[in-house]
Each structure stands twice: as structure tokens, then as C-alpha cells.
Amino acid sequence: MEISRRDFLRYTGMATGGAMATGLKLRFLEAQTEIPNPLEHYPDRNWEKVYRDQYYYDRTFTFCCVPNDTHNCRLKAFVRNGVVTRIEQNYDSHLVEDLHGNKCTPMWNPRGCLKGYTLVRRVYGPYRIKYPMVRKGWMEWAENGFPDPNTPENQEKYFQRDRDTWVRASWDYAFTLVAKGLLRIMSTYGGEEGAKLLRKQGYPEEMIEAAHGTGARCIKIRPGMGFLGMTRIYGSVVRFCNMLGLYDGKGGARNWSNYTWHGDLGPGHPMVSGIQTFDSDLNDFRHAKLMVFSGKNMVENKMPDAHWWIEIMERGGKIVNISPEYSPASQKADYWVPVRPGSDVALMMGVVHLLIKNNWYEVDFVKQYTDLPLLVRLDNLKILRAADIISGYKNKELTGYSKKVQIIDPQMREEWGDFVVWDTKSNSPKVITREDVGKHLAAMGIDPALEGSFKVKTTDGKEIEVKPSFQLYKELCAEYDPATVQEITSTPKEMIEQLAKDFATIKPAMIHTGEGTNHYFHCDIKDRVNFLILALTGNFGKPGGGPGHWAGNYKISVFPGSYVMMGEDPFHVNLDPNAKVEDIKVKKYFKPEEVCYWNYQDNILKVKGKSFTGQTHMPTPTKAIWFANVNLINNAKWAYEMVYNTNKRVEMIVAQDWEWTGSCEVSDIVFPVHSWMELIQPDFTASCSNPFLQVWKGGIKPLYDTKQDSEIYAGVACKLAELTGDNRYRDYWKFILEGKTEIYIQRMFDACITTQGYKADELLKQDRGALMLFRTYPRITGWEQIQESKPFYNKTGRLEFYRDEDEFIEYGENLIVFREPVEATPYLPNVIVATHSAIRPNDYGIPLTATSADERSVRNVKMSWKEVKKTKNFLWEKGYRFYCLTPKTRHTVHSSWSNSDWNLIWASNYGDPYRMDKRTPGVGEHQIHLNPEDARELGINDGDYVYADANPDDRPYVGWKPDDPNYKVARLMLRVKYNPAYPRGVTMMKHSAFMSLWKTVKAHETRADGRAVTADTGYQSNFRYGSQQSLTRGWLQPTMMTDSLVRKNILGQGIGKGFEIDVHAPNTCPKETLIRICKAEDGGIDGRGSWEPARTGLTPAHENEAMKNYLAGKFIT
Amino acid sequence: MTKVYNWQLGREMEYPYEAARPKRQFAAVFNINRCIACQTCTMACKSTWTFSKGQEFMWWNNVETKPFGGFPQSWDSKALQLLGPQPGWDAGSKAHDSPHGKYKGETLFEAAGKRIDASGQQALGYVPEDKEWRAPNFFEDTANRSPKTVNGVQEGAMLPEHQIFFFYLQRICNHCTYPACLAACPRKAIYKRPEDGIVLIDQNRCRGYRKCVEQCPYKKPMFNGQTRVSEKCIACYPRLEGKDPMSEGDPMVTRCISACVGKIRLQGWVDDPDSPVHYLVRKEKVALPLYPQFGTEPNVYYIPPRWAPRGYLHQMFGPGVDEAIAKYTKPSHELLAVLQLFGVTQKLINCYEVTADTIIAYGKEHKEIMRVPINEAVLVRDEKYLNVT
């Protein structure tokens, strides 16, 4: 007798109900078949069909999985009865080629990771947004004609975002509401009246001025990693911002940054090279012989491509991991270098010290490609210019790459001047230009000095002392000898010496950084010192060499012509579907802005009347926020400050997503969008870490009443046309409205050198990627600069290690120095640990006792290590003595997948599909890893619940009080996990889990099963109380807000200075926190006793004799 | 009990049935060095086989962090405790059919016959309680001990052995040559397929006595409370049978192996001298069985992690550890080439050919499946293209 698996399940299900199915009953009575040896023969194998049937599928299609990571993997979906039942990789890499027949290898197979495999749980899961939703209070506010939102009564009535209820709206009504909201903001905050109102609301004058009387400038739209959807997200968001220029003809909305605010940009990369980030395709990793990770966990991140570097252990390469804990990357390493959190720059300066002291550097490379031979004036700390010493000097005409490719603005070129080196052959100063790099310098027949002190006469007759910046570094680095660095960093000095020796002897070498070191206030300095090590050892522009900085997929610069969609002139829109790109008029009405200011209480950094936020960076007041493809508020550092304080001044918050997130929970209007498998119109993307260009769309019908993101902007635009009578709003979206997104794709392809020649429709049909057209495969940044002697995208054309802008000199960072973290340090926050006379910081009169975040951020004082180690951080003194590392988990992509059951079970050390402990917020929950000895001293057992608190001055939000019900929601409570991999004093909590909010706490406390899931919206929190962001706050770094830094523009070859979106702007730094931990509840089921496994004798710090023998390998004697 | 030959032990051992090796034996090599514990394998399996009611806790495939992690909790330290400390292998008796020498201790089958507390068991074992199947990822990334800090200087770690360590262990059913589950089943509802050596629990015949759950030392059979029978990894036999239209009738590797983005997994016939798996296990001997002392002759083989303390690794993978690590970290040309075959294709590789710069993989009927260069080339395009765009 045969039964199918489905029947089988049904019958046995009935059996448990007491009614035994007759068929089965009979089977129990069947005679046993004789089976003499089941190793050899089994008589009846027909049942095996059960699993063959379960495996069956009807059809397949491919699509791209495009969360906020860098891989955009093409996956194959298997469909049965119209439902995607499972997913597998497309295994197509060896078939991917470019227009010239270049192919890549099957070693890129397979792409993807666990998240792709559990997408079915999300797409068909319980958290989808099924139709447009509007918050009841906001809808009433709109329907009542937008009465003054700033009165206490109206705040109470209309703006209880976390406690309000939601109503379903038709698309038409939701579009109408958003269009009306936008019109209200543009009309209310435009002109002199608008400025007056903003002044009344307390915004700083600089921010009000930055709006230039244009209300649209107070509207902020953010594409979350828009690069992952070039038409539906990036293209449409910026296009929408640009379109709002139609309202007053002056300016459109502001588009918020993507990369910096996540804390992802390596802000020092443009400070050295002018280039946003100096990263390469990940298959280049396998060419490296020395692979150094500094705060980069490339085991848990970059998962489809981690094999490229792990494989070097099979190829004679050496792997070094620098991190506070024995991390996932440490296990793969030849050696793990421990370091005190936040002191990595000191460690690397120790390496520089040894490289210089032992002459372990490549003299020719240093002279030809870096600014280290350029002379620096010791009187004013500026780089000596030719015009300083030659009367009537006229800057040389630049005829090479500067003119042909980089198209340098003549005025800027004059500002930069020409530079001077000391020629040892003639023993005299010699002028060089930004084009005298590489072989061009060699051809000049001069030999620039790297060391020494020289006297030159300035044109006004003064004799001044000058030194090559190399000489300055040589002097400065004497302060970072191995013994001192060992004290600063707690790293064994033998390991510092080993690392230096390895850099000196093993080539090519790479240094990769990630969030580990990037989420500190001084993350720009860590980039600068890593570049210095690699420059001293000649590791740029060749296979397997160079720095890398890794985080999200941000690199819109690989589509330099994307302005044809984003910035098309709304007054002169080209409606010809066959238009050539040169006939499309581009005019920028949109204006980029950094999100960090909103995340800084919608404010700038201003101390004692001085703004440290440069004019080019200046934000405007935020009156509307609209975001797509991002969990903006949940992922905001200091999230409860945003929810309870900052957003009170924001009048409209619009969210677009396919699942209900914490951000949706505290928004006003929520638009549902298709998942990646449901996209009806095609889209495209590429990557900062692989060479694949992907065009794709979905393969199943949308499950719910959802739209493509781009259609939502188009829908609101149509309403604007209707409400204003201006049809240009509608025309601007013609091809989206007609379902012809391919036209925009093809326009962008035609406008980008990297994609010219590709046909969008062909790529869509071929079901696999194509190779992006870069100079090399793999793309190796700096290849042309080094191999072909072309200038970098900065003033000197060289890798710059000396910064002579006024800001850098004032802040004491003209040279690379180690600064203590601004908060996460036992010592005086932000102190410069160096005494060299060429460091002349300005403390702006702020006393060493000052404790406010603003003051700490701008207090520049220098001290020797001997002095520093006697200082104390006031927070340390108050008992805040744990560092809190907040890396990304492998089980989610930041907050995406945080509510997916299978992911949550694995992301949690306490995952349990049956929720035996009813306190667990879902099938898993968040935890903090703690050193067992630290935990024991605090009376905390493995598995206990604890409270974790940070600086009470401003966290979890400003103005909290112990009896405030919001404080109960915002104060972080979570489970402890003993993990000896973390040294004493260092804790770890993965970032971006779904935050607790008013209604999840209410559910947790009132539902019989204790789940923290909201009753109306179904939002699932990963916490009982609080969030990872309870411990974090916004910071603004002065060196990242200059108006003077010269850097390449984000798109194209042009060079500019000051703010540039995702290139030169503050980077959030969540690791700047010290925390205090105390026990809240016992860990056993429902709080009874300790967590059971901790009682078995088989867990860390509780090992019984047998377990000790197991750990020591004694079961084989 | 009868006597069967176990090559991993280099000797005969006791087993309830006569030896009967299948025509070909399913096997896989897992390279622990490359594993990133991403659990893509885990989700590939889950989404294919164990998504139904009654299977919520089941992870036929899982990756756990050693030494503390385990699914179910502490399965291996518990099994080792039951068996007790055992003498290792006699290295002097290495031969073709005893490549690692002769095991001097007792297997779980042999111990069961001698222990009063194991009455009725064919292999020493225990039934995990429900709560032990919870929290499959407890102790992820957890180290064996804390780094020491002396006078403010913190201890690091350096090859050849990290004294502070953890590594990832990837686990599916071992499709053992002498399965303890099969030996344990009183209904004889568990069998080994003669054509490929896959071990299956007959879902019709099983009555849910859970003897397989009790006696499999690897704890890979799992009891389904909904169907009230036990179930386990089936090595994705519909794929191996060439039933997936994607492969045009060619045998395909399992879902977990195909999914592995760390490129740590390779499937093949361990007893076919042409198979790359046979090469890694029997010729080059870089891949070793998991807890061979249990006596089941498991057929998933591991390239041991180069960094873990050797005593711990000997306990887990037997006496071949040092040679395997030495060869893996300085691979021969052929070994380096074979390492390139991991994760390049979803099809089953039957044999291969190595040239100076390429390895060619062949499948059914010697059809070429894939050519893989041993090194990645750097291609340079025309000067009009830019790397900094």
C-alpha cells in the first residue's frame, strides 16, 4: 500500500485526535516482511516516492536578491502551483561575459547566502504590508486642514505616532494625502513667512538660511541603498526630489545620503586619494599574500565572496586579524592581534614607527606616488607652494590627465598651486606639479629628499624652516614605539613587531577595514594610517595589494551617467522614447544632504557660537521624511531620541517597504511595495565588490495590493498635477506610468561608460548578469594611477598624508595622530596622544572637565601618553566600564530578516520555535555577549536577563525620567550570553534588531503568550524592552564637515571640494559608547532559576570534570 | 553480533548485521577551514525538507561552533562521556586498508555489549530531551576560554595552534557504512540503498520507537511529533537520481552542498578511485571521518581546521589530523586543483583531469561539466575604460 506524504500527515493528524484512519489501522496488522539484512536489501521501497513528490516543481525563474549588502546575487526560484517553494543559486558565473568576450570564472559560483534561501518565509510570511495604511491621527490632521502641529493639544491629538491606530486607505487616497502633505510643507515653509515660522520653531539660523526660502528644501527623501534599484529606488527618489523644483522654480527636495549615515564610508579614503573608497572586486583578494583585517569580520560579512581571501591559506598567503575579541575572522588567521577597542590607530602608528625606523619602506614608491616628499612650512604648517618662494610664479599649465580626464576647474587649480620638494642632487628646492607622479617624476631627473630640515626664503624675504612631511612622520612616530603602543593598545609588542616585519617582507599586501574600526568617531584617521602603511610598502594599484573598506552597496559612481534619470530637467522633460542621451536635458533642482544632522536632533555641531558644520554641508530643517527600502528610524543611532523628541517637529513621515518595520510603526503613511520576486517592471544594479551588472524583474504575481516603488512616486506626482493643475508633474513620470521602465534603464546604460553598448532588454532576457566595463577585471582601484602614472583625484595628484587645510590644522589632525575615542575610552575623551610641535590643536577654551557631547567633539588637546594615562573619562568614573561592540550578524542583513522565523531562531542564542519560555519576545531574541568572569563579578549567570545602560545624560533619550512610561519602552533589557572569546571589559551585541515600541511592550505584558507583537499592525520586536539603539547616539565629526577638502565628485571625473554626498560627510559611530550592566531577571524558564544548559556542567565557566577533559581532547588517550 | 571490517579503525569490529557494502557509497568532503557558518546549507535543507508542522525544531543540516556548540545541545561531549576515554590508534599498523593504523579502543557497538546500563542497546546512546533540541545556535562564535591579560597586555593567538579557539562543524547525516540507527531499529525500518549507500528511514514502516534517535551518536534521526515517526537527512536522493529537470538527467549534488557559498563542500563516491572525494579521503588523506572511534564508518569527511589545538582534533577526527593539516596548508598541484572543484557546479563530479593551469570536471558518461582555472587572471581593457568612475 502506498500513501502520499500529504495523506500520511493528514491521517496521523487525525490519529492524534483519536479517530484512527482505517487504512492505517489495517497496516498495523500486516504481517512483518522478512528483512534479514537491511544493509544489503530492503524489500519495499515504493514509499521513497514521498520525497520525490515533495521535491517536485512546475517551473523556475531567476531574480536578484538585493538587500543592503554588496552582492546582488541572482537566484533561481522554484515554483509549484504558482507558489515559490524554494530557492537555489543560479550557478551562472562562468557564463557571464562582457561586450568584448571577456569572461569570468566558475570560481564566482555559487552566489547567495542563507537570506536568499529564507526569502520565501518573508515573501509569504505574516509581516507583509498588504495595502496602503495611514495613521489615524495624521489622517485627521490632514482632513482637518493641517492645523498648527506645534501646539501641545494638536501634538496630543494628531502626533501620538507610537500609540496611534492605523487605517487602510485606497491608493488614490493615500497618494492624495501625501501630495497634500507635500504641498502644505512647500507652501508653509517657503519664503520669508516660512523662515519666520522655522525661526519660531527654534532651528539655528544657518539651517534656515540653507533652505533659501524654498519649502521643498525641508522635504527629505531617502533611498535606502538606492543603488540596489537604480530605477525603482535611486533613480526615482532623486528624480522626485528634482521634480519638486517645479513648485517654485528654484529648488527641489533634499535627497538624503545612503552610505555615510550607516557609518559605512571610510571617510579617510577621500582624504588620502580624493576617491570615495579605494575598494576592489573581491576576486582580487586571492592575489594577496598578506591579508590584514583591522576591525573587519569578513567571515560574517561578504559571505558569497569570503572564500576568495580564505583560500589564500591554501596558496601560501598569510592572514592577520586585528580585533578586540577572538572573532570569526581571527580563527582563519595565522595570527590574531588583540587590541583595546578604539585604539587601532595607535597600533598602526606603531607599525609605521617600525617601518620607518628600520628603513622597511619602498623609497621610489614613496617619492613617486605620495606627498611625503613635499615640503611643509613649519611657520604656518601649510604645504610650501612654488608661489611662496618664487616671486611672480605662474602655475604651470596642466596638459595631461588633469586636463583630459579630470577636467579640473581653473579657479581650483589656481588655489592649489604647485608644490616644492628638496632635490638632493642639486641641493635646492624644485617645483613639481600634480602631474609629476610616477614615471613623470622619475623623468625629471631630480631626487626629492624624504628626510632633513631645510631653509627657504619666501617671496616676502623671510627665511623659514621647511621639512618633507616624511621627516615629520619620522619624528612623530618616535612617540609610538612598541613599548608605548603596547601600553596604549594592550597588544603584545612582539605582535606589533611581527606585523611590521610581515608588511616589510610580504607582498602584495592588503588592509581591509569594516564597521569594527569604522564605527568610531575618528574612523577617518584609521583610514589615513592604513593607507600610510600600504604606501610605505608600495602596495597600491596592483593585483592583491591595497586598502579596502567594506560595508553596504553604495557605489552609484559606477553609473556615472545616471543623472539622465535622476536629474532630468522637469521643465524640459524629454518624452521621446527613442531620444538620444545627449538630447536629454539635465538640471539639478535636487540637493543632497547628510542624514546625520537629522540624527543629531535635526541640528548642526555648534559650540560657543562657532559652527563646525561647513557651509557646503549645511542641512535644512526637516519637516517631511520619506524613505524607501530602509528601516530608517529603527536603524537610527539614538532611535528613541528620534521617536520621542526629534520627530515631533517632523510633520509627515512616509514609509515604503514590503514588510512592516519599526520605522513603519512610527510613520504617518505606509506604502506597500512588491518584493524582489514580484517586480513587474525591470530594474538593474551593480556592485562595489563584484563585476556583475544585473537586470531583472520578478516571476510571480504580487500577492497583495502592492506597487513598484517608482510607481508610488509617479502616483504622488499625478496627484500633485491634479491638485496644482500643472501637468508637468505627471509628464515627468510618463514612462513609469506606461510601464516602460526599460527606457530609463537604456538611457542610463547609454550615458555610462561602464555600460555603453549593453541592451537592457537583452540582458533582461538572458537571465544572468553581464560584466561591468571597467579598465580591469577584477576592478583594481588605483591601477591607472600606479601602473600608468596618472594623478589621483586631489590637490597634489599623490596619495596625501599631510592635510594643510585650516580645519585639519586647528583640529590637530594635519598629521595622522592617535586620538582617544570621544566616548568609548577610560581616558580623557578625544585627547590627541602626541606632543610633536607640528601638531597645534585649538581647544576653543573648552575645559578638560567639560562633559557634553558637543564639547567633547571639538575639544582638541594634545598630551603625551604618560600624561594621558593619568587622565580619566568621567563616564568610566561613574561605572560605565564596558565597551559595546555592535557588529552585523550573519543571519540578517542589518534589520532585514530580523522578524523571519528561521533567521531569528539562528540569530539568537535562545532560539526556540515553541517558545517554552513565555518571556521570549518571538521565536528568538537578542543577547549581549559578555566575558564570564565579568558576568560573575556582577552576579549575572549565563542566560539571565540584564539591563544595559549608557550615558544617562542623553540616553536612551534626552529628558527621560525613571517613572516615564516611555523610559520603560526604551530602556534596554536582554539576555546575557557567556562568551570567553570576549576579553574582560568588552561586550558584544549585534546591531539593528527590531526595536521595542509602545505597542510591542503592551503586547508583551498583556498577551497570554507574552509575544512582543503589536495587535493591529503585527509588528514583531526582537526585544522585550529597548533596542540596540538605546545605547547609541548621533555624533558629528568636525574633520568630516570641512568646506575645503578636495575630492572627486560622486559621479563622473570632476573634482570639487567640501561636502559631497557619501564622500565627504559625517559618518555615524555607534561604537562610541560605554555601558553599565545589571541583572534584571533569572534566565530559567519563566524566570525560575538559572537557564537550564548552564546547570549541565557543559557550558563555558561552568565546566564539570568531563567537560574539561573534552576541551582538552582527553577522550582519546 | 557479527564481525565487519571498518577501514577507519583499521580492524574488524562487532555489528549486528553482516557487512554489505553498497555498489557505490555517497560521501562528501567538508573543508572546515573555509566554513563561515553562514548556515546557507541549513536553510537550503530546511526549505526543501523540514518546513512542515512537527518539523519546526528539525535541522537535518546544521553548523555548530565547536567546542561548546551543538545540535542537539552537547551531543558529542555526551556521546564521548558514555563511551569513556579510549586509547587511540596504533600508528605502526598502517596499511592500504588501515590508512590511519589500528584503533585500540572500543566502539559504541562493542561498548554496548559490555555495559549493564546499555541493556537492549546495539550502540551506546541516549535520547535527548525536548529542551536539548532548542537553541540550535547556542554558543555561536564562542571560544574555549578567555584570553589572559598580564600586566595590561592581552594574550593573542598564533599558528600552529590557537590556544584560544573555536571552529565551525558542519553536520548532516553521515550515511554511515555501519549505521547505528539501522542497527538500533527494532522494526528494521531503516536501510541502506545498495545503489548509493544512502541510509533511509522508511516513513511507512517506522513506528516511532526512537531507538534510532537514541543510538545514532551523531543525533541525526529526529522524531516528528506530528507524523509520530522518525525522519532524517535523505542525501537529497531525488537530485542524485537525476530527477531534477535542471540537470537534464544528470545526477546533482545535495541542496546543502549546492548552496554552500563558502565553497567548502564536495560530493562524490568515496569508493570510486576516479572520484575527487576518493582522492581527498583515501589517496591524499586530507579529509577525515568525524569521531571514527564511534565505529559507524561515517561517510562525511572533514578537512580539519589548521588552527585548532591538535589534541582536541585527534579526539574528533582520529590520528590523521597532523598529516591532513600539513598537506592542506602546503598543497600539491593536484590537491590545489581539486580544491577548485568545490562549489563550481551543481552536478555530481565523477572524475577529473588536471593540467598545468586547469582542472576539468567530468560527470555522468564522462561528459565534461566544467573547466576551472587554478589561478584567477587579471584582464585589462581599452584605455577608454576607467577603474575610478
Image (spheres, rainbow, N blue to C red):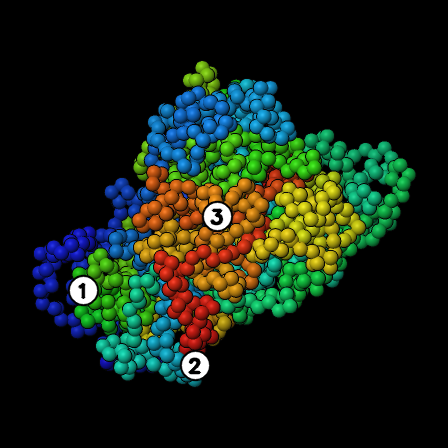
> For the residue marked with disc 3, what is the amino acid?
Arg
Residue appearing at x 46%, y 27% in the figure: A154
- Looking at the picture, does residue A968 appear above or below residue B292? above
Residue appearing at x 9%, y 67% in the figure: A31
Residue appearing at x 41%, y 37% in the figure: A163
Depth check, front residue: A998 or A280: A998
Viewer can see residue B356: no
Same-subunit check for callouts 2 and 3: yes
- Residue A946's spot in the image, x, y percent? 46, 56
- Looking at the picture, does residue A88 appear above or below residue B341? above
Viewer can see residue A1090: yes
* Mark 2, secondary structure of its residue: loop
> For the residue marked with disc 2, what is the amino acid?
Thr
* Mark 3, secondary structure of its residue: loop
- Looking at the picture, does residue A808 appear above or below residue A135? below
- Residue A1060's spot in the image, x, y percent? 61, 36
* Mark 1, secondary structure of its residue: loop
Mark number, residue B207: 1
